[in-house]
Image (cartoon, rainbow, N blue to C red):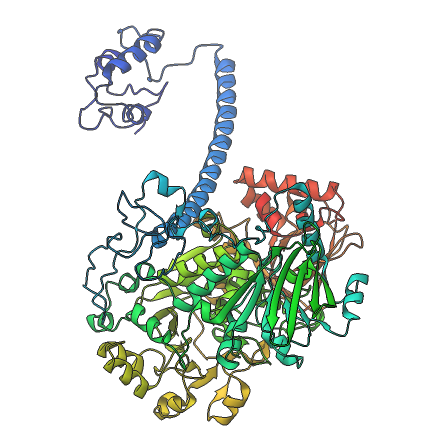
Amino acid sequence: RTSLVSDGLCARHCSAEQLAAGAAIPSHTNRCCCDCCLCGCLLSRMPLDGSSMFRKWIKSGAAAAPSTEDGAASLGRCSPVPAGGAASVGSRASKGAHDASESAEALQSQLEKLEEECQKIKHQLARVHNHAELSIEVVDEDLTLTRSRFSRAAPGATPAGSLLPSKEGSIKRGAGARGASAGGGRSTAGGVASSLNSSSIASMSSFGPRMSYAVRPAPSPGAAASHAPTSAKDLLAMVQRGRKRAQYNSRVDSEELAALTGNGAVTLLPRGGVHVRTRHGPVQFGIPPETIKDSLQLGLDVPKVYVVGKERFNLKFGTNTAEFEFPAYWNFFIKGDKTTVVCAAAAAAVIRQVMEEVLEGPAEEHLHQDDEYSPFVDDSIYAARPDLLREIGYFKEPRNGRKIEADTLLQFVEFACSEELPAGHLLARMAFDDGTIEVIDRGAEYDVIVDDELVATVPDWLSSAIADPPHILMPMATAVGDAIDFEAPQFGITVLGAADGFTAAGTTAGFILWMRGRGILVDPPAHSAHYLRRNGISSRKITHVILTHCHADHDAGTFQKILLEQRVTVLTTRTIMAAFVRKYALISEMNYDFLQRLFCFHSVKIGEPVHFQGGSIKFFYSLHALPCIGFRAELAGKSIVYSSDTYYDPDGLAALQQRGIISAERCASLCTDCSVQQADLLLHEAGIAPIHTPFDALAKLPDNIKRSIRVIHCNDARAAESEFEKVQPGFEHTITIDTEPPLHAEANQILQILLVTDIFRKFDVESIVDVLSVITTRSYSAGEPICKAGDEGRFLRIVKAGIVMYERDGARPFELRYCDYFGEGELLTDATHAASATAATRVEVLEIERGDVQYLFRRRPNLMARIQQRAKLSYDLSWTFPGPFLGPDTAARQAVV
């Protein structure tokens, strides 16, 4: 079609009169009859009754148009150029080209903004998905939310002022698509609901009530108020405690710590906390994860008395410093005694609620197992689903005549005012058969007085402090040059910890599942992020976490990774995820809605594969004291099975079936296709029944299954007595399952790097293809310079493997690792390198030449402008102050991009 276009109107078949009359506007398409030019595009955007609007536009524009001899409007017809008019035509052409150039730049900028907006919408959609997956569904409009307990209340009791419904008919349940829950006759396909009245919305979120608004139990007479700062003086004291915690370093002795450790009764524990020996038993300040391992390793008595500090959470390391689960289990199950908790009244209420959730499990309205099975699974698999309420109830049954509940494991002694002490001092007194222990809170310090004799004075900030670097019991590189030259396997595992919570040596069980060079953390132990970083493993290689259940030895590292790193995806079921967020909202004192924004929740369905790196992972519910999942991972025809914490013993399971705790289908599934499947690697936990699997039950398995078993979550002595090999922690002990390499492996690796690098992740497919066509790989030996300060900037470099030291003007060098990049500013500003880069280990980098980078970014003017601005700032400002901000690919740097 050759008709010319003038002012957006077509004149090949339509005269001005026809256009003005609207005769050429077919009602079914709203397009010009010739359908050949911008006129049709313009009219297609008009409403069907827009002819009058169009006639007005024609009158204003067409009236001024020149006419030909035959009276027809020359709206687009080609006419001879008048003599002497060539200059004016050229001028118009030049102006048109300039306008077109400006228009193209504006459109390109608009397109780039739309792409960025698309990314924001994707993130918002992920957050909405989190809310939708964990939302509660139907609550009576006139429901009075009165229960402060987010889990279970006493039967028939609904305390005034609480926030959740009682069980007597307040909760409406949706009809399950496949009927009642196995073995229990319950229908839990719905859940608790989110359609709350306006007064309820303010205090509820998708995970349950916001506990910060919940009504706390009234403190006993004389009890101290909450430690939350209520005055400028209290706020200043809190800031000072935080500053001292941040400066606490196990390698530097201050005068304050030297005076403390000079007291023979005081021991600073490696993981954090202060152990004070007294004649009535030890008293400990601060309870970080795995704290009983410190006492056991150092030959100290595990305390029965713990003092909770004014802050119960260490934000620097994302760590709970009031972790009572395993101290309470040790004293209850091993020593047959209670654990005494010395704290403020508000802290006592929170600790009690956390322990109740852990011991009792989620309330019935928070159990969603019927909804957690794929609609496409076989009926036999769905029939074998657990009745979580009955299974949790079985593990709560009294042991040796003692109930397993918070009040039988813990007893609270609250700080209170005393007439014997000066104003502002608080007292907690504990009486023993042969004397007393008193702990006096003097604001900045605690005094421990035994039988009226001062034994120790402990700074208050130490009760929530963790030394930097944190103490971990895993093999760890001590310097960058000693880091293992580790290449992630195509399929396999690296064990981070293999012990249980009561073993003195070793870290609690957790590992990395490797698939095609990228990893998924499975129940990471505390401080595992620090361990990975010290061993040269970038967080960008491990962006997913599998959370199996919510015991402290399995979930502490998950919360750390969520807080300390970015873009973490958590794989677990809706029931477990909701329990996790309820628990850590209480522990960290962060509200539910804020916590939901820190991670992406992938709600797994039992029996439905989760696809990852060309492989798949299928999950199953194991049998444990809390809802718990295991999984089977498959890649290229090979498989790895992880039992997670579970009870496997065919005789014991048969007894549970006879009691009606598990169904026949559930019993058969636990015996054949959950934790004891045939696989290339079967990673099975072992321990003391009925919480864990006894070794003799594993010994009775068929040989074709036994030969692939490696045990985990047990102590070395029991493993040595069995016929099974225990896995060992450390990258040097990585277990690799041989698989065929994937097609286009190199392109796959480069694409994965580009997708997690902030300057490329927003590129469209066409642009990524362009990047692949110009990118090259280059290797450097340890100690070899990559670029020097003052050199011409010739390449954009992205670290593919190894560690690069990036240093400017003698300042402390940065460590660049997987997916970190440098050199982009020099390419876009025509500057020379202001820093030197040297390979600290054997290094592979991806390189893109200057001309190719400029071409790629010229089509993204907004991104190019931000990179140029950032590069200018990095040259103008000193690295002494803004170095951490302007260092290559830090979190703050990514925010600028």
Q: Is residue 868 above or below residue 149?
A: above
Q: Quadrant of residue 451?
A: bottom right
Residue at 25% x, 28% y is 35
Relative to residue 695, is residue 296 drawn left or right?
right
Q: Is residue 683 above or below residue 80?
A: below
Residue sticking out furthest to the front:
419
Residue at 42% x, 75% y is 644
Residue 791 at what x, y percent from top left? 75, 51
Question: Quadrant of the image for the C terminus?
Answer: top right
Q: Nearer the viewer, residue 309 or 761?
A: 309
Residue at 49% x, 52% y is 598
Relative to residue 520, is residue 151 drawn left or right?
left
Residue 744 at what x, y percent from top left? 45, 65
Relative to residue 566, is residue 164 drawn left or right?
left
Q: Nearer the viewer, residue 8 or 541?
A: 541
The number of callouts visible is: 0
Q: Is residue 335 above or below residue 173?
A: below
Q: Nearer the viewer, residue 621 or 636?
A: 621
Residue 417 at what x, y percent from top left? 62, 53
Question: Quadrant of the image for the N terminus?
Answer: top left
Q: Is residue 570 visible?
A: yes
Residue 832 at what x, y percent from top left? 73, 47
Q: Is residue 713 visible?
A: no
Q: Is residue 107 above or below residue 776?
A: above
